[in-house]
Image: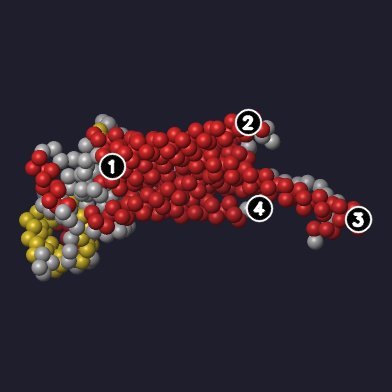
Amino acid sequence: MSGQLPAPLPRARQRRRNPLPVILGVVALVGLSAFIAFGNLNKSLEYFVTPTEYQQQKAELEGRPIRIGGLVKAVNYNPQTLDLKFVVSDGGASFPVQYSGAVSDLFKENQGVVVRGEFQGNTFHAQELIVKHSEEYNVPKTQSELKDMLQQTQ
Amino acid sequence: MTSKSSMKKGNLITTLLGGATVVTLAVAIALGLAAPLDLNQGSLVRLMFVHVPSAWLSYLAYGGTGLFGLLYLIGRQRRWDRLALASAEIGVLFTVVTIVGGMLWAKPTWGVYWVWDARLTTTALSLVVYGGYLLIRTLIDDPERRARVSAVVGIVGTLYVPVNYMAVEWWRGVHQTQTLKLLGKMRFDAAPIYGWVLLMAVVAFTFLYLYLLRVRGTLAAREEAREERELLEDLGAGAQMGAARG
C-alpha cells in the first residue's frame, strides 16, 4: 500500500498528444449546434403549424395528430358541459375547433392558442389546448379597465 | 498563501456585495409589490419579476463558467478553475429556479405546466450540459487535468446562452418572445413600470451572482487547501514509514 512506497517516483513522461481530435471534436460540436440552429432541423423543432400551412400541406398532414396554432375567433363556450367551439385562424385560413374541458382564464377572442388533436372532416378535434401569452404586459389605463380587472380577480 | 490583510480585504468585498444584494433586492421587492397588476393576467405578472432576473442570472453564471474556463486555459491559474466551478453550480441552481417559477406561471396562463417547445427544451438541455460539466469534474482526480477538461466543456457550453435566448425567435413555440427587443430597433413592449421593476431586480440578481460567486469560490479554495494538506500529510506519513522500513 502507500506505506511501501520506496522512493518518490520520477515524474512520469508526458506523452505529447495530437491536438487534432480535440479540435475536430470542438468543430463538430459547433457545427452540430449551427446545423440545429439554421439547418433543416428547423422543421421538426417547430411546435405547431399555422392554419395556412395546414391548408398547403393538407395531403401530408391529414388524419395525423398535429398541433395547430393561431388566433381564437367566434368563441362558443358552454360552462355547464365544458363544450368549447371556436375557430382558429391566422388571417389566411381558418378551421373550426372542438374541445371539451376547462380552459385557462386568459382564453378569449383574438388570443393566441395552440391546439393538439386531429381533423375529423373539416373540424379539428382538440385533446389539448394551450393558451399563449403575448410578450406584452400592460397595466390598466382607464377606470373601466381597472374595474373589469378587479372583477375578474374576485 | 493569502496574507491576513488581503483576507480581510476579501471579506470586506464579500460583505459589501452581500449588503448591495440585500438593499437592491429590498428595493426590487418594494417596487414589484407596488406595481399595478397586469391587465390580462392580474397578480401572475409578479412571477415575471422573479422569472426574468433568475434567467438572467443563469445566463450570467453560464457565461462566467465559459469566461473563467478561458482565463484558466490562458493563465493556468487554479483560482479561475474554482470560479468556473462556482459559476456552473450557481447557473444550474438558478436554471432550476427559472424553470420552477416559469412552471408556476404557465399552469394558470397556458393551462399546462410544461410544453416541449424550443425555449423550454433548450433550457432543460442546459441542465444536462452543466449537470454533465459537474459530473465530469467529479470523475477526474488530477486537478490540472480536471481544470483543463472542464474549461473546454464550459467554453463550449456557453453556446447554450445565445441559442436559448434566440430560441423564441428561431423556432415557433409557446413561450413568448422577448419583451425587451434588442435586435433591430430597441423597444420595450410592456408598461414602463414593469421595466423599472425588472431593471431593479436584474441589478439585484447581478449582485446576488457576484456575492454567491465569491462565497462559493472561497469555499472551493478552502476545500482545495484541505485536500492538498491531507495529501501532503499522507505523503509525509508514507515517506516516514518507508524510511522506517528501509
| Residue under pointer 3 | B244
Disc 1 to disc 4, how far (Cα)?
49 Å
| Residue under pointer 1 | B33
Q: Amino acid at mark 4?
A: Asp
Q: Is residue A9 left or right of residue B2?
A: right
Disc 2 to disc 3, how far (Cα)?
42 Å
Q: Quadrant of the C terminus of chain A?
A: bottom left
- Residue B202, given in percent of the width and then of the height, sits at 37, 38
Q: Earlier in the sequence, mark 1 or mark 4?
A: 1
Q: Nearer the viewer, mark 2 or mark 4?
A: 2
Q: Nearer the viewer, mark 1 or mark 3?
A: 1
Q: Secondary structure at mark 4?
A: loop
Q: Secondary structure at mark 1?
A: helix
- Residue B195, given in percent of the width and then of the height, sits at 28, 35
Q: Nearer the viewer, mark 1 or mark 4?
A: 1
Q: Earlier in the sequence, mark 3 or mark 4?
A: 4
- Number of other residues with Cα within 10 Å of mark 1, as a class: few under 14, some 14 to 19, many 20 or more: some
Q: Amino acid at mark 2?
A: Ser
Disc 2 to disc 1, how far (Cα)?
40 Å
Q: Look at the picture and state if A66 lies above or below A132.
A: below
Q: Do marks 1 and 3 share a chain?
A: yes
Disc 2 to disc 4, how far (Cα)?
30 Å
Q: Quadrant of residue B79?
A: top right
Q: Earlier in the sequence, mark 2 or mark 4?
A: 2
Q: Earlier in the sequence, mark 1 or mark 3?
A: 1
| Residue under pointer 2 | B6
Q: Which chain is indicated by disc 3?
A: B
| Residue under pointer 4 | B141
